[in-house]
Amino acid sequence: MKKCAWCLDGGMMERYHDEEWGEPVHDDGKQFEYLMLEAMQCGLSWSLMLKKREIFRQCFDNFDFRKIAQYTETDVERILNTEGMIRSRGKVNAIINNAKCFLGIIEEYGSFDQYLWGFSGGKTMVYRKHQKGEYETRNELSDRIAKDMKKRGFKYLGSITLFSHLQACGIINDHDPGCFKYAELLEKTDVQYID
């Protein structure tokens, strides 16, 4: 079975690819978890984020954005002193800030899912140039979302980070055309092709 070349480690990255990456996410809790991982990843590798995912889960109340939005300086210190945790006060504070912003979007739109998928009209985008090997790390869609989220106060979520999130949560299907997940996802999503 053919898979995207980036995931072929025979372990954690491959499981992430096969079970999660690109699957359409409509659960706000899972959206926040992915956004949190993306923010923590800035400047680091994705494989490190997957390795530390359980530590993050323990530090951040199983990614419960409602609880995280209530964190105080005591929680920040607890998190920074957890063994194996990435010790970036800026990132930890950004996660807490982003949880508050996330709740603001839910209050306005009813769910983060409605807000985010609204940018693509509820469709999964397939960029033909990506399928021809013309890859990019950001695009007009991620620029637009990043600009709007920055205006709403989100931190550590610029256009490149959000592009990666859009791939992870299924708004952009960037599996290699020969990968088994590419065709599988096309069958179960409403797709819009972009030249």
Image (tube, rainbow, N blue to C red):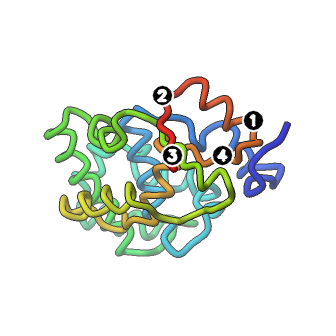
Label 3, label 2: how far apart the Cα atoms are: 11 Å
Name the residue located 65 percent from the left edge and 50 percent from the top edge.
Answer: 131
> Image quarter for residue 46?
bottom right
- Residue 180, disc: 1
Task: Give yes or no for contact between labels 4 and 1 (Cβ–Cβ under 8 Å).
Answer: no
Sequence-earlier tag: 1 or 2 = 1
Residue 71 in percent (x, y) is at: 26, 56
Residue 74 in percent (x, y) is at: 28, 64
Task: Give yes or no for contact between labels 3 and 1 (Cβ–Cβ under 8 Å).
Answer: no
Q: Which residue is mark 4?
A: 175
Name the residue located 26 percent from the left edge and 43 percent from the top edge.
Answer: 66
The answer to whether 74 is drawn above or below residue 112 in the figure is below
Name the residue located 41 percent from the left edge and 46 percent from the top edge.
Answer: 63
Q: Which residue is mark 3?
A: 172
Task: Give yes or no for contact between labels 4 and 2 (Cβ–Cβ under 8 Å).
Answer: no
Label 3, label 1: how far apart the Cα atoms are: 16 Å
> Image quarter for residue 157?
bottom left
Q: For this view, does 118 lie left or right of residue 31?
A: left
Label 4, label 2: how far apart the Cα atoms are: 16 Å
Label 1, label 2: how far apart the Cα atoms are: 18 Å
Tell which of 69 and 5 is nearer to you.
Answer: 5
Task: Give yes or no for contact between labels 4 and 3 (Cβ–Cβ under 8 Å).
Answer: no
Three-letter amino acid code at disc 2?
A: Asp
The answer to whether 3 is drawn above or below residue 42 in the figure is above
10 Å crowding of disc 3: few (<14), some (14-19), many (20+): many
Label 4, label 3: how far apart the Cα atoms are: 9 Å
Name the residue located 41 percent from the left edge and 43 percent from the top edge.
Answer: 31
10 Å crowding of disc 2: few (<14), some (14-19), many (20+): few
Three-letter amino acid code at disc 4?
A: His
Q: Which residue is mark 2?
A: 190
Q: For this view, does 135 lie left or right of residue 10?
A: left
